[in-house]
Image: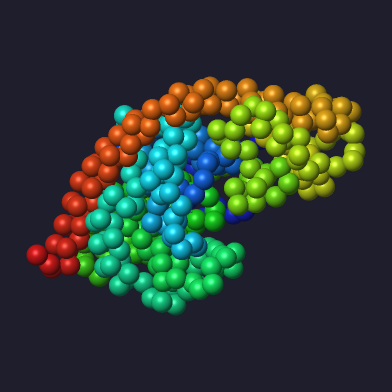
Amino acid sequence: MQTTTSATPAVGHTTLDEVLRHPEGHRILTGDRPTGPLHLGHYFGTLKNRVDLQAAGVELLLVVADYQTLTDRDRADRPAEAAEDLVLDYLAAGVDPARATVFTHSSVPALNQLMLPFLSLVSVAELSRNPTVKDEIAHSSQAAVSGLMFTYPVHQAADILFCKADLVPVGRDQLPHLEVTRTIARRFNERYATELFPVPRPLLSDAPLLLGTDGGKMSKSRGNAIPLGATEDRTAKLIRSATTDASRHISYDPEARPGVSGLLRLAALCQDRDPAAVAAEIGDGGAAALKKHVTEAVNEYLRPIRARRAELAEDRTLLRTVLTEGAERANALADATLAEVRHAMGMR
Ligand code: TRP
């Protein structure tokens, strides 16, 4: 499979292969905002890695970041259902609920209590500099920027530090947040002369960025994404609408032909092949043959995931149970960490 990354890796970043070779002793925490169905970009960018890591024996915690959805909107839209839907996508993709801890922000009050001392460890200037937050503010449709927008990276630090995760699988856009978490861990340890918090490292996906059907980054807000749970017909329709170009000869050239190359990469990921080999097979077939090939590759790849998803969707009590049990375990961990934090700070 083609695995190129152009950007330079962050300091201390770990590769998936390294962890898969030595899975023992790691605890991984990551998560998503419950703002809509997960799509193929999520799947190949991070979801599949989580499942592979879990299969290798790494401990996995997943936060359904329901409070964090309030950063760029006034109200969360049906947050309880949205949280369950996210769990549905997780389980369909292969997360094993018997071994993973899946929980919502709102079910773990100690996260909010950890946020307060953590806020005391960062300056307003540092919070205002965060490039991911700046970008979100620039794209927000809200009239006013809320205090939560500036401070949610500190809440996210609590997500990661409450369970003392050592690795955080994230996309590159999340690296500034992880830097905030690392700073807070270091400063807490220093200020209170303790070794309470390990300084977590990012685990970057080496999958190439998956392009959406318009040639841009696949993202639900751009309307160019293929949801994991889409029907086969809908998938065909979405791929048929994808942007390509006029040349009948299909070749893999991400710079000059982003649309065609994005589709080739999608088929290649689904078939664990090289995109150039897929291109060679289609040859002079043009965009129609390419799209037919990609549709079949995607639908075939997603068939077992979709079958599992449909089965799970029939009875949502399991989804609720996963969140209830996840909350129980997360609360136990978070309460214990909060007690340690209070102790380190000299409080009783
Ligand atoms: N900010 C992440 C996103 O928008 C979601 C998230 C919340 C997260 N808490 C986290 C990711 C902790 C990694 C670790 O997708």
Q: For the N terminus, which image quadrant?
A: top right
- Image quadrant in which you'd find residue 322: top left
> Which residue is rendered at x = 82% and y = 27% of the image?
289
Asked if residue 256 is positioned above or below residue 68 in the image, the reply reads above
* 269 relative position to 193: left or right: right
> Which residue is rendered at x = 80% and y = 24% of the image?
281
Could you tell me how many numbered marks the image carries? 0
Q: Is residue 243 visible?
A: yes
Q: Is residue 186 visible?
A: no
* 343 relative position to 304: left or right: left
Asked if residue 139 is positioned above or below residue 218 in the image, the reply reads below
Question: How far from the left and from the top, in percent, is residue 21?
Answer: 44, 32
Asked if residue 298 is positioned above or below residue 87 in the image, the reply reads above
**Residue 65 vs residue 253, the one in the foreground:** 65
**Residue 246 vs residue 191, the one in the foreground:** 246
**Residue 314 vs residue 120, the one in the foreground:** 314
Q: Residue furthest left?
A: 348
Question: How far from the left and from the top, in percent, is residue 121?
Answer: 32, 71
Q: For the C terminus, which image quadrant?
A: bottom left
Question: How far from the left and from the top, in percent, is residue 126?
Answer: 44, 73
> Which residue is rendered at x = 54% and y = 37% of the image?
43
* 136 relative position to 20: left or right: right
Question: How far from the left and from the top, in percent, is residue 335?
Answer: 19, 52
Asked if residue 11 is positioned above or below residue 277 in the image, the reply reads below
* 210 relative position to 254: left or right: left
> Which residue is rendered at x = 58% and y = 27% of the image?
302
